[in-house]
Image (cartoon, helix red, strand yellow):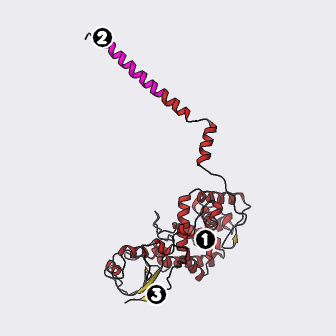
Amino acid sequence: MTPNSFLNKSKKFILAISCFILLFILFQLLNFSSTGTDEKSQKDYFNGRFKTGGINLPKDLNFAGEKVPLNDFNIQESLDRELLINTYSPSQTLLLYKRANRWFPVIEPLLKKYGIPDDFKYIAVIESGLTNSVSPAGATGYWQMVDETAKSYGLIVDEEIDERYNMEKSTEAACKYFREAYEKFRNWTLAAASYNIGVTGLETQLSKQRTTTYYDLFLNEETGRYLFRILAIKDVLSRPSAYGYILGKKDLYPPIPTKKIQIDSSIGNLSEFALARGFNYKILKLLNPWLLSSYLNNTERKTFYIHLPAQGVNIFAWEEFSSEKDTIRTDSIHSHEN
């Protein structure tokens, strides 16, 4: 083959490849335009698949019986923000609604016992999502307490036990805090806000800004949003259908029927302890997350109450305790073991 003929064939090959690439690009452009990128097609596409819109703010709202000044534009917009977040974060809000069905029956009687308004249960919702979470700052458990605060209100926090993971114990500790804060401020809204910023921090801002109400304070974003997050989740969980959440009883997480046994000695092996009672270590840990180790060295013979599955309940069978029948947590069942 002569050099000229080789060169001619190479040019033809390159030209053919270029034409193929050009035709491919033109095909893609034509295909893209045929899908309908004009404004009407886009509107039809999105309107057929996505439904979003504004929400109507509640006309009357209160926290613990204390009226929210909804005539203030900043109050309205702050509340609107939190309601929109909860309305259009459906997976998270659905989980909160499901968990509330399990844990509110535990929290509500304890709030009542300590004289704390029922609305304070929503603080646990916004603090932890009703899970035993740990914040980057080390705040732990359902009520998100740091070590020092937890210990100051009587909770045990050490290598073996962390009662911030105990719903009953941590709720009682939170109630003690709320009662002290209310005695200080004589206002439930301020008592709730202080749970985020601290009593001293809130006192400082009230004094510096010469006001006596939360809604007139200029605060950092976290504390400034705090009450509005509580108010929003209160309204959404109280009136789910008004925000597009339709759930039946079968959709909710049921309270788990349990009994409590009193322990005032050590337990060398929690796995064997559970198996001897007809269930496994996993269930023991799920019902008692405050037990951090695989044993309990109770050298001081303190009294603890351990949750066990209620007698006759198959804890693995969801349908057994998630039906329409009454499923109140049976903590009134007690036994004692040495």
Q: Which element type, helix, strand or loop, lies under badge 3?
A: strand
Q: Is residue 48 visible?
A: yes
Mark 2 highlights which residue?
Answer: 5
Please tell me whether mark 3 or mark 1 is closer to you in this view: 3
Viewer-proximal residue among 118 and 271: 271
Distance from the alpha carbon under mark 3 to that under mark 1: 34 Å
Q: N-terminal of the two: label 3 or label 2? A: 2
Contact flag, marks 3 and 2 (Cβ < 8 Å): no
Question: Residue 125 magenta-drawn?
Answer: no
- Give the residue type at disc 3: His
Residue furthest out toward the right: 71
- Give the residue type at disc 1: Ala
Mark 1 highlights which residue?
Answer: 192
Residue 37 place in picture, x, y as percent: 58, 36
Question: Residue 18 magenta-drawn?
Answer: yes
Q: Which quadrant holds residue 66?
A: bottom right
Which portion, as a residue range, is magenta?
Answer: 1-25
Q: Can you say which quadrant of the picture contains the C terminus?
A: bottom left
Main SS type for the magenta part? Answer: helix
Mark 3 highlights which residue?
Answer: 334
Residue 158 place in picture, x, y as percent: 39, 76
Residue 127 place in picture, x, y as percent: 53, 67
Q: Which element type, helix, strand or loop, lies under badge 2?
A: helix
Q: Which class describes the residues within 10 Å of circle 2: few (<14), some (14-19), or many (20+)?
A: few
- Give the residue type at disc 2: Ser
| Residue at image point 67% right, 56% down | 55
Viewer-proximal residue among 40 and 175: 40
